[in-house]
Image (spheres, rainbow, N blue to C red):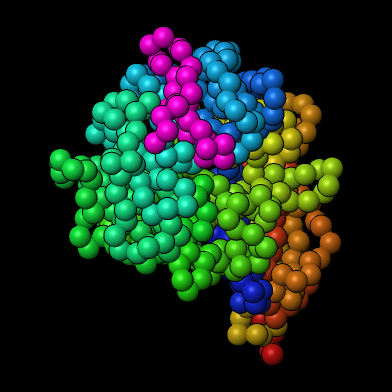
Amino acid sequence: MKIPLFSKSGTLRAKEASAERCVNWYPEKGGKDEFYLKPTPGLGLFVTPAPPIGSGVRGLYTSSSNRMFAVCGNTLFEISIAGVATSRGTLGISWGRVSMVDNGTELIIADGVNAKGWILNLDTNVFTQITDIDYPAGYTVEFQDTYFIMAKPNTNEFYISGNNDGFTWSTLDKTSVQGSPDRLVTVIRNGRDLWAIGERSTEVYYNSGNSAFPFDVIQGSESEIGCASRWSVSQIDNHVFWLGANGEGKGVVWMSNGYAPVRISTHAVEFSLSDMSLINDCESFTYQSEGHVFYVMSFQTGKKTWVYDLTTGEWHERMYWDSVGAQEKRHLASTQTFFNGKVYVGGFTDNNIYELSETVYTDNGDSIIRIGQTSNIHAERKRMFFHQLRLDVERGVGLITGQGSDPQIMMQWSSDGGHTWSNEHWESAGKIGAYNERVRWNNLGQDRSRSFRFKTSDPVNFTLIACYADVSLGNG
């Protein structure tokens, strides 16, 4: 019989209903079956800027002129194609996320934690603090139609700057969201539209050309879906993504479809979020790779990273294995930018900037633990005798020497819906060039319900293709 592979993470409160997990693998349609499972990308170190104060990549950005910038600690760095970091200016503090955007001449950095803003002149590389008394001191900044745009903290207002002038702001150049009196969390551009997302509601604006204030609300775009975490808001492929909240609750993930929010989180994702003591520390980024479009959201307190694949509509987990503490933690990346044809991400605890690569199979040298658990298999609760389990994988991809020279994969099974697991049973997936290696386990006993778990840590292209079992049924 065919054993369905894990195409998603779907563990529910009732594990007997679903114990499925997909950690550091993700499904791609095609191959021998409906889908196969690819290893998630690894992290290759690109550069480690050295700020005088602080640690952590607070923001990454690629300008419209294809220049890469990073805020690490208290310093703005420009990063060359060769991976050389050059200091361009010093910020007031060394912690907390920042937001960056440019208009071709001015790169503006918003640091709402410090209630300050800075501008780097891209022609002269002069770095200057914004001193206008009307500067709204927002956490995030956008640019559209010659204006920098910023939500003022703890209000329902957003401001626009002077025409192509991030140094000039006026209390007359603002508007208040109309549909609800809640406080604005952020404003994000999506195509030619501006999404104003509050704590309990959302409205969408467009440039109407109004002489008093150029942006007006699009009638019918209002919704009673707000945001639980500012840095959960991201945009890609004409969609806005965010972790939602409103007057009735929180912990649902939303994606824009036109002007309407659409729920994309599953009950399993929502169960995971409800189990966390804190979700307002969520931070996110988006990227695309090999035809997939990903929304990545990480929780520092909850130690989890959930990833939505817009291409397949499925969720999977990404995880960094803390070998010292022997525990699963959130993925290392917190910020992202696309530069010189590559996806780069910033570490949230250190100043490392990594290339996120489909052909790297470690996290900067640390093992990537990949875990997959199937759904619970049963035959109307009749007794099943498992004579053999066969796993179809990409074989013969071992390395020449060291870990991965004889790639191993581990199998366990659970008879109680994933509450407890058997001993570990390891098999080789084939040394380099051993393309006919058979990955199989024999004489696996009997059960009325069974879930299988697979795990590997070898730094190779461990692609899972299909799973089969020789099973006979008992009488009752």
Q: Nearer the viewer, residue 380 or 459?
A: 459
Image check: 411 left or right of 106?
A: right
Side of 178 relative to 446 (left or right) = left
Asked where in the image residue 145 lies, by quadrant, the reply is top left
Furthest toward the front, the residue is 133
Taking the view exactly as shown, the residue that stands out farthest to the top is: 124
Q: Residue at x 55, y 47 (%)?
A: 283
Question: Percent position (x, y) of residue 50?
Answer: 67, 19
Residue 106 highlighted magenta (yes or no): no
**Measured from the top left, where is residue 169 in percent x and y?**
34, 33
Residue at 51% x, 33% y: name it: 116
* Up-down relation of residue 474 to residue 157 (above or below): below
What x and y, as percent, mark residue 434? 67, 36
The magenta-colored residue range is 108-134
Residue at 64% of width from left, 59% of height from top?
A: 278
The answer to which of 182 and 189 lies nearer the viewer is: 182
Camera-side residue: 410 or 342?
342
Percent coordinates x, y for residue 118 in the rendering: 48, 26
| Residue 168 vertical placement versus 316 (above, below) | above
| Residue 395 in view (yes/no) | no
Q: Is residue 126 magenta?
A: yes
User: Residue at (81%, 65%) from the top-left corner?
Assistant: 422
Where is residue 218, by image quadrant? bottom left
The answer to which image quadrant residue 224 occupies is: bottom left
Q: Quadrant of the N terminus?
A: bottom right
Count of numbered badges drawn on the protein: 0
From where the camera sits, is residue 96 visible? yes
